[in-house]
Amino acid sequence: MKIIVSLGGSVLAPRDSERVGAHATVIEGLAEEGHTVGAVVGGGTVARKYIHTARELGANEIELDQLGVDTTRLNARLLIAALSERAATRPARDYETAGAALRRGEIAVMGGVTPGQTTDAVSAALAEYVNADLLVYATSVPGVFDADPDENPDAQRFDRLSAGELVDVIADIEMTAGSSAPVDLLAAKIIERSGVRTVVLDGTDPDRIGHVVNTGEHDGTDIVP
Amino acid sequence: MKIIVSLGGSVLAPRDSERVGAHATVIEGLAEEGHTVGAVVGGGTVARKYIHTARELGANEIELDQLGVDTTRLNARLLIAALSERAATRPARDYETAGAALRRGEIAVMGGVTPGQTTDAVSAALAEYVNADLLVYATSVPGVFDADPDENPDAQRFDRLSAGELVDVIADIEMTAGSSAPVDLLAAKIIERSGVRTVVLDGTDPDRIGHVVNTGEHDGTDIVP
Amino acid sequence: MKIIVSLGGSVLAPRDSERVGAHATVIEGLAEEGHTVGAVVGGGTVARKYIHTARELGANEIELDQLGVDTTRLNARLLIAALSERAATRPARDYETAGAALRRGEIAVMGGVTPGQTTDAVSAALAEYVNADLLVYATSVPGVFDADPDENPDAQRFDRLSAGELVDVIADIEMTAGSSAPVDLLAAKIIERSGVRTVVLDGTDPDRIGHVVNTGEHDGTDIVP
Amino acid sequence: MKIIVSLGGSVLAPRDSERVGAHATVIEGLAEEGHTVGAVVGGGTVARKYIHTARELGANEIELDQLGVDTTRLNARLLIAALSERAATRPARDYETAGAALRRGEIAVMGGVTPGQTTDAVSAALAEYVNADLLVYATSVPGVFDADPDENPDAQRFDRLSAGELVDVIADIEMTAGSSAPVDLLAAKIIERSGVRTVVLDGTDPDRIGHVVNTGEHDGTDIVP
Amino acid sequence: MKIIVSLGGSVLAPRDSERVGAHATVIEGLAEEGHTVGAVVGGGTVARKYIHTARELGANEIELDQLGVDTTRLNARLLIAALSERAATRPARDYETAGAALRRGEIAVMGGVTPGQTTDAVSAALAEYVNADLLVYATSVPGVFDADPDENPDAQRFDRLSAGELVDVIADIEMTAGSSAPVDLLAAKIIERSGVRTVVLDGTDPDRIGHVVNTGEHDGTDIVP
Amino acid sequence: MKIIVSLGGSVLAPRDSERVGAHATVIEGLAEEGHTVGAVVGGGTVARKYIHTARELGANEIELDQLGVDTTRLNARLLIAALSERAATRPARDYETAGAALRRGEIAVMGGVTPGQTTDAVSAALAEYVNADLLVYATSVPGVFDADPDENPDAQRFDRLSAGELVDVIADIEMTAGSSAPVDLLAAKIIERSGVRTVVLDGTDPDRIGHVVNTGEHDGTDIVP
C-alpha cells in the first residue's frame, strides 16, 4: 500500500522527543511491513512564534509563509534524524524528488514547498502525484467537524464525507472568522480531484496511524472518493 | 510606482511576435518612466495542448500542473527575449529572486512556481511580497463578470469590487461547472489579505496596461482594498 | 544491452498522445526485457514556433537555442508522464545525472543541455558517457542520405557508413545551404570518437526501435565504428 | 567602513520582536551612514531545543549541526524581514554570495554554512573574505574573559587582546569541561590569520554596535591584529 | 564598448602569478575606461595533465571533457582572485548568469559550460549572447595560420579573414591529423552566425589585448563579419 | 563494515595514473567484498600550486581555501573516473548527498565542502555522519608522530592513541610554527566526539588500506575511542 502521512507541526511536537520518536517508529513499522510511505510535516508552534514576531516587525504575508515553509523543513529534518537509514537523508523540496525517493523504496519526508500553500495542500498534492492508496491527516483535532470544536462545544464530527462534501464543509468553515479547519480548502480540492482515499484523525497518538493502515478502522473522518 | 503585470498566456500569444513585442514595449515604457515593473506570464494555448496530451496519456494532475509551470517559464523567457537589457536575464523561479531583481531596478519576469498554484496566484503573491502599488491582470476577458461571459451573454461586468466581494464572486463562479473566472480563488484571497489595488482588464491591447498606470482609467474591473 | 534512443521532437509529436504513448511503450518494453535505456528528446515544431517568434523579436541565436533547450525539456517531461514508475521523475540536465539514473536501473530521459549543442549531440554524448552498446536516432527521415531527400528526389540512402564516412557526409550536407542532415556534425564527431554503434532510422513508427534492438535489423543507416 | 556583525541567536531573540527590530534599526542606520554591512546570525535557544530533542532521538553530531545551521538560516530570514529593501532578499549560503551582495551595496545576511563550523567561524571567515575593517561579535557575555563568567564569578574581562593571545585564551577555555567561550577556536584562528580588527561586546543592547562603529568605544574586548 | 576576452589556459598560466596579474590588470583597465568586459578562461596544462591521467585510467571522452570544464573553472576563479571588487565573485556557469553580471556593470568570468564544447566556443557564444562589439582570442599562437605553425614552418598567418573564410580554414585544419587550430570549428561557426568582430592574437603579452581595444591595431588575425 | 577512506591529495597523485588506479582498485575491492565505502580526496600539489599563485596575487585566505576545495573536487572526479559503475557519478558536495549514496550501496566520493575546513575534517565528519566502523587516513607520513618527522629525525610514531590524546598531540603540533600534523585539530576533535575507530597510515601503498580493513593490522597509528 502506498501511504502519505501528513503530520501537523503540533502533532509532531519538536520539543518532545518521545512523540517524535513514536511517530518515527510507526512510519518505520509501516515501511518494514512493505508499505511505501511518505511523510509531510507541518510547522506547529515554532512556526507560529516566528510568524508572530515577523508580523509585529511588519513582514508581509509571503515572508511569513516563507518562515513557515522553512520551519516545516526544520521539523522534517528532525523526523529524518529519528528515522532509520531507510529514510531519504534530507527533506524533499518538490514532488518529483519525493516521488523519486518513494520509487527507490525510501521513506520520503517533505515540509512545505512555497508560500501560498500549506503542508495540508502539499500532502494532498504528494498523494495525488504518487497515486497513493491512502492519505492520513494526523491532526490535533480528531476529524472533520461541522464547526471548529475549539470554538463550539456542540460541533459534530463527520464519520464519513464524500470529497465533494469535504470541499463544501471546509469552504463553510473558512468563511467563519476565527475558525480553523483541520484541512484547508486547497487541500480539499486536490483530494476531490485526485480521488485518493483520505482519513483525518487525532494524531497525538501515533499508533492510530498504523492502526488505520492495517485495519482500515479509526475514530476520525473518512473522506471517500 | 511599483507595478506587477499578470499576462495570461493567451494574451501574450507566443506565436504572434507583434503581440509579444507590443507587451514588451509597454513594460519597457513603464520602466523608462521610472516605474518598478514585474511581469508574470501564463501558459496559454501551448500549456493547454501539452496538458491535453498528457491527460490522455494518464498523467495525474500534479504532472499536468508541472507541464503548465514549465510552459509558463518558456513564455516568460520569450518575453525576456523581447525586452531590453533592463530585464533580468532569466525567469525568476521564486518570489525572493524576483524581488531581488526589482530592488536592483531590473524588470523581473516570472512564470509559475509550483503545481497547485496558477500564475494568477503567483501574480498576487508577488504583488504582496514586493508591496506593489498596483496589480494589473491583463486577461482575455475585459474584467470580472457575474457569470462567465463566454457562456452567458447576459453576464454583467463589475466596474468596481471590494477585495472581499471579489472573493465571493470568484467562489460563486468556481462552484459553477464549466465556468472560468478571470482570476482564481487563491489569487482573490491573496489580493484580499494584501490590500494591493488590482485592476482586471482586457489585455489583448497592451496599451491599456500603460494607460491604467498613467491615468488610473480603464474599462475593466477595479478591485479596491 | 545499453541503449540510448534519440527521439526527434517531430517524431515524438507532443500533440499526438497516441504517438507519445507508443514511444513510451517501446521504451518500457525494452526496459522490461532487461535492457538499460535512456532517451533524449528533441524540440520539434513547438521549439520551431517559439524560435520563429523570438527571432522576429530580435533575439540572438543563443537566446533562441535556450528556448529550444527549454522546449526539449518540456517534451522530455511529457515522455516521462507517459512512462511508468521505472522512469526517473524529471528530465536530467546533465550527463552525470542521467548516468546515475541508468546505473540505478531507471529509464533516464533528457532534453537539451546548453545553447550551442543540439539534442543530436546530447544523444551521442550520453551514449559515449555511459558506454552504450547502441545509439538509435529515430528521426523524421529514414536514414542518412547523400543529399537532403526533401530537396532532392534522387537522394540515395546509405545502408552502412563508417563513423568517419558519416562525418564526411554530414560535413558535406552542412555546407549546402538549406539542407538539413538527420544528425548534426558535432554529433557525428562524437559518434566517431566514441565508437558506439549507431543506427539512424525512421522514428515515426516506434516499433522500429524495438525491432532493431531485438533483431539488429532495420531499414535505416548503420553507422559502424 | 566595511563591518561584519555577528549576532548570537540568543542576542537576536527570535521571540522578541522589539529586540530583532532594534538590531535591524542599528544595521540599517549603519548602512544609511554609508557603511557596508553584513550580518551573521546564530541559532540561539531554538537551535538548542531542536538539538536537544534530536540528541535524545539518537541523532549524530553532524545531524545536530545541520539542524543548527537550518535554524540560523531561519533566524537570518527573520532579520531580513525586519530590514528594509536595502537588504538581500534571502540568507546567503556561502561567502561568495554574501560578498557579491556587499559589492552591490546590499546588506548581506548569513546564517551557518555547514556542519562542523559555528556562526562564530562563519562571521570571521566572511570578515576575512570581504576584507572587513571591523568585525563585531554581539554576544550574550560582555567580552572575552579569562574564565567562563557564568561559572566563575571572579572571571576577569580582557579589555584588549592581540589575536594571538585570543587564540591562546580560547584554547584554554575550550580545554575546561563545561565552559563556553564567546567566540570559538576556529573563529579565533581565522581572526588571527586575517588581521581584521575585532570587538566582542554585550549584544543585548543593539545600540552598542552602532556606538563602537561610530566612536571606536565600547565596554567589551578589543582584539587587535 | 562591450568586449569578450578568451584567455587560453596556457596563456593565463596558473603557475605564473605575474602573468595572471598582468591579465587582470589589463581587464581591470578596460573596465575602468568604461568598457564592459567578460573573460572566458581555458584549461591549459593543468587540464591536459588531468585528462592525460584519466585517459590512461580508461575514462571516456565525456568524463575527460568534464575534467577539463572543472579545470577551466578553477582557472577562472584564479583570475577572479586577481581582479578587484569590480568582478563577479564566482565563475558564471551559463550565459545568462554571465550576461546578468555584465548588465550590472561587473566583470564576468567564465570557464567551460559542458562536455562537448570548448572554451573557444563558450567565448563565441557569450559574445553572441551579449551582442559584444569585439571578441578577442588571446592564444598561444599569434593568429590564424593556413597550417599549424608548430608543425609547418612555412605556415602563413592570415591578416584578415571573413567569418565564412574562417570556418573553411578551420574545417581544413581540423581535417589534418595532429594539427590544432587556434579556434575550433564550433566557435568559428558561432562567430560566423553572430557577426561579432573577432581578433585572434598572441596572448602571452596581455598588453596586446588592451592595445587592440583602444587602437584597433594588432599583429594577429582580424575576422570581419 | 562501513569504511571512510581519506586520501591525501599527494597520496592520490593526480599525475600518476598507476597510483590513482591502484587506489581505485583497493576501494572497488572493498566494495566487492560487501563493505560500504566512502572516499574523501584532498588537494595535494595541484592545490598548493594554485594557492601559491593566488597568494602572490593578494587573494585572501578564504579565496585560497576555495581554490583548494575546487581542486579537491577535481581530484575526486579523477578518482570517480577510475572507479567502476559502482561509484556515484559525481563528487558529493555535502554529507547528506554522500550519505544517501552510501545508503543506496554506491561508493561515495567527496572533496572539500567549504572554506575553513580541510578534507581531514570532512573525512571525520562524513565518518561521524554515517556512523562508520572505521576511518582510515591514508597520508604521506606513516602515522601520528610526536613531532613533524620531516623536521625532526627523532620524531617517534605513536602506535596507539586515545582520541583525547590525539587532540592533545595535534594541538601541540599545531602550536609549533612550520610543523604540519597528518590530521588537523578540527578533524581530531570530530574523531573524539564521534568515537569512530581511526587509523592513520602511509597511503603511498594503497594495499595497506585493504590490509587494515581485512586484518585490522597496520604499521600506522591506531586512534581508539
Image (cartoon, coloured by chain):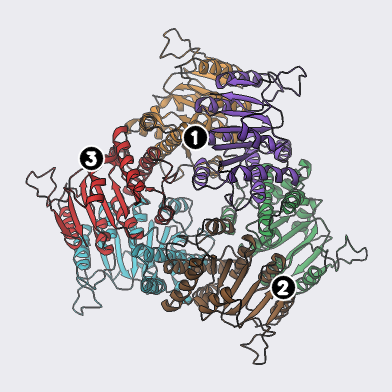
Chain colours: A orange, B purple, C green, D red, E brown, F cyan
Chain bearing mark 1: B
Q: Are marks 2 and 1 in contact (CB under 8 Å)?
A: no
Q: Secondary structure at mark 3?
A: loop
> Which residue does the image show at 31% across and 48% down from the upper left?
D61
Depth check, front residue: E120 or F25: E120
According to the picture, the residue beneath numbered tag 2 turns out to be E163
- Residue B219 visible within the image: yes
| Quadrant of the snapshot with the N terminus of chain B | top right
Locate residue A143, reporting x and y percent.
Answer: 47, 18
At which x and y percent is residue D218? 18, 49
On screen, residue B2 versus residue D139, left or right, reads right
Q: CA distance from mark 2 to mark 1?
A: 50 Å
State the separation of the CA atoms marked 1 and 3. Answer: 31 Å
2 or 1: mark nearer the eye: 1
Q: Amino acid at mark 2?
A: Ala
Which residue matches tag 1? Answer: B131
Question: Mark 1: which secondary structure?
Answer: loop
The image shows residue D27, relative to residue D129, as above or below, that is: above
Q: Amino acid at mark 1?
A: Asn
Residue in front for this viewpoint, A66 or E194: E194
Tell me if residue F123 can be seen.
Answer: no
Checking the image for residue D205, the label placed there is 3
Query: SS for tag 2?
Result: helix
The answer to which image quadrant residue E170 occupies is bottom right
The residue lying at 18 percent from left, 55 percent from top is: D222
- Chain of the residue displaying label 2: E
Q: Nearer the viewer, residue F71 or D112?
A: D112
Mark drawn on residue A21: none
